[in-house]
Image (tube, helix red, strand yellow):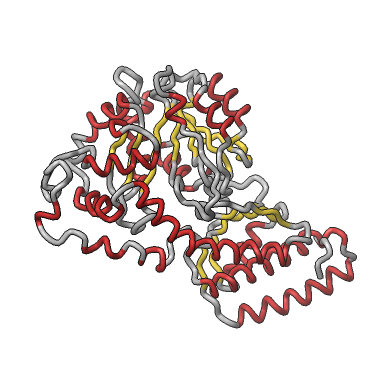
């Protein structure tokens, strides 16, 4: 039946519920074990980079472009060719790039930790000495951003996430009026989990913010900067082109990595900001480590050759990921499209689909799926403190399961959404 559930009679609801329940019990009896809880690359994606593992065969292969032996200590901010690789991808100068280890999340955590301990620049008050520190958190958003705030006791203020980015009227009003607001989390391209791309107007408004706090920072997590699923991809305005030479030149911290480009646990990452911010960060990082894994940086540079090499590599990822996204979106359209019980995003890139279902039913759908052998991202993960005010959002991650398993998982998910919706309407 494809009639909207809200238009069905009680007899029709009972009849469909009986059919859905019988189908659900058969699925439970099948003993499925399917996981679409996190946006992990699948095996085929990881295989794309395996030749990088043997690219350095001798000591002579380990020399950087400047002749430095990458097996040794030194070059704290990253080898020149790795800095250039990230600079060309992100449209910045190499002096604005610091190359770290495998995780941009670590660089984000460290940036918050330095601000807590030392302030964001010479002479600024360490956040730990402030009476209150708050961050704006576009929601639905990325759970690991929220976890960093919780780790440091930073108060999180949800801001509505829209198709073109956060609600900028709210962002501008709060940032300009509250000195305790020290930062905002952003995933500007293919935002986690909605897949939204910030519009040119949104990026311009970010660049022109007038924060009450002089140490306010925009945490620009560009995790999916080149993770397009289709050839015709939306373009993201370069925020550094807008802030360079202005009073907001030091306001933006950008982060990115190759974690979903090469090997997810063994990539390289970058912290990108003004020359003054990079210098400030290095003054503290030099006490933390002597250098990051320069051999891995060199492997990546030799493997790709250039930023264009990375872009060509990402087309191979897209060919693997695109069918997975389309399997899920096709299932949503077929099973839920006419029922008026769900809406979902149709991202052009990134790793997630955001599914909004009947208010108050997300936890029920999660439990039904789990009992049927399908693991989803925990309900509330996309909101600060794990509290979805409508109990309606689910983050769907199509990347990891094989296609046939993904088809089955999508089928089970749609079934559970319909069951929960009928329960809600019949209550």
Question: Which residue: 54% across, 54% down?
Answer: 230
* Image point (40%, 23%), residue name: 244
Q: Is residue 336 left or right of residue 263?
A: right
Give 113 or 244, whichever is nearer the viewer: 244
Displayed quadrant of residue 338: bottom right
| Tally of marks | 0
Vertical side of 176 occupied by 226: above or below = below
Which of the two residues, 170 or 268, is positioned nearer the viewer here? 268
Q: Quadrant of residue 98?
A: top left
**Residue 115: image location, x then y, percent:** 35, 29
Please provide percent x and percent y for residue 302. Answer: 24, 53
Residue drawn 60% across the image and 23% down it: 173
Q: Is residue 170 left or right of residue 80?
A: right
Quadrant assignment for the C terminus: bottom right
Q: Position of residue 261 (x, y in %)?
A: 38, 55
Asked if residue 299 can be seen in this view, the reply is: yes
Q: Is residue 58 above or below residue 195?
A: below
Is residue 109 visible to the viewer in this orientation of the structure?
A: no
Image height of 406 relative to 97, above or below: below
* Quadrant containing the N terminus in the rendered view: bottom right
User: Compared with residue 23, is residue 101 higher up or lower down, i.e. above or below?
Assistant: above
Position of residue 44 measured from the top left corner of the image (x, y, whole percent): 41, 68
Q: Could you tell whether 59 is left or right of 110 in the image?
A: left
| Relative depth, front residue between 89 and 207 | 89
């Amino acid at each position: 039946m494809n009639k909207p559930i809200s238009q069905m009679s009680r007899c029709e609801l009972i009849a469909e519920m009986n059919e859905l329940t019988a189908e659900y019990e058969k699925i439970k009896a099948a003993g499925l074990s399917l996981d679409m809880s996190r946006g992990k690359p699948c095996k085929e994606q990881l295989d794309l980079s395996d030749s990088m593992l043997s690219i350095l065969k001798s000591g002579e292969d380990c020399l950087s472009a400047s002749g430095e032996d990458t097996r040794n200590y030194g070059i704290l901010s990253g080898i020149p060719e790795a800095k250039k690789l990230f600079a060309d991808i992100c449209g910045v100068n190499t002096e604005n790039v610091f190359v770290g280890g495998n995780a941009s999340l670590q660089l984000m955590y460290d940036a918050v930790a330095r601000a807590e301990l030392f302030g964001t620049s010479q002479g600024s008050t360490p956040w730990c000495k402030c009476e209150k520190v708050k961050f704006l958190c576009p929601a639905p958003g990325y759970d690991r951003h929220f976890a960093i705030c919780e780790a440091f006791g930073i108060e999180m203020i949800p801001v509505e996430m829209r198709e073109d980015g956060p609600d900028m009227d709210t962002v501008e009003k709060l940032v300009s009026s509250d000195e305790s607001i020290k930062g905002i989390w952003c995933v500007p391209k293919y935002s986690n989990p909605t897949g939204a791309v910030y519009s040119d107007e949104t990026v311009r408004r970010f660049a022109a913010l007038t924060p009450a706090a002089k140490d306010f920072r925009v945490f620009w997590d560009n995790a999916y900067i080149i993770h397009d699923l289709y050839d015709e991809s939306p373009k993201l305005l370069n925020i550094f082109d807008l802030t360079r030479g202005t009073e907001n030149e030091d306001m933006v911290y950008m982060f990115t990595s190759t974690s979903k480009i090469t090997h997810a646990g063994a990539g390289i990452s970058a912290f990108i900001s003004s020359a003054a911010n990079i210098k400030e960060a290095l003054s503290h990082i030099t006490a933390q480590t002597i250098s990051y894994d320069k051999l891995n940086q060199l492997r990546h540079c030799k493997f790709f050759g250039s930023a264009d090499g990375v872009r060509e590599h990402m087309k191979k990822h897209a060919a693997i990921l695109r069918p997975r996204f389309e399997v899920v979106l096709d299932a949503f359209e077929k099973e839920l499209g006419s029922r008026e019980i769900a809406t979902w995003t149709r991202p052009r890139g990134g790793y997630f689909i955001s599914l909004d279902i009947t208010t108050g039913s997300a936890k029920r759908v999660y439990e039904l799926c789990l009992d049927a052998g399908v693991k989803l991202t925990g309900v509330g993960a996309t909101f600060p403190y794990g509290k979805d005010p409508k109990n309606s959002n689910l983050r769907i991650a199509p990347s990891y399961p094989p296609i046939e398993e993904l088809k089955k998982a999508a089928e089970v998910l749609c079934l559970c959404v319909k069951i929960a919706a009928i329960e809600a309407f019949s209550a």
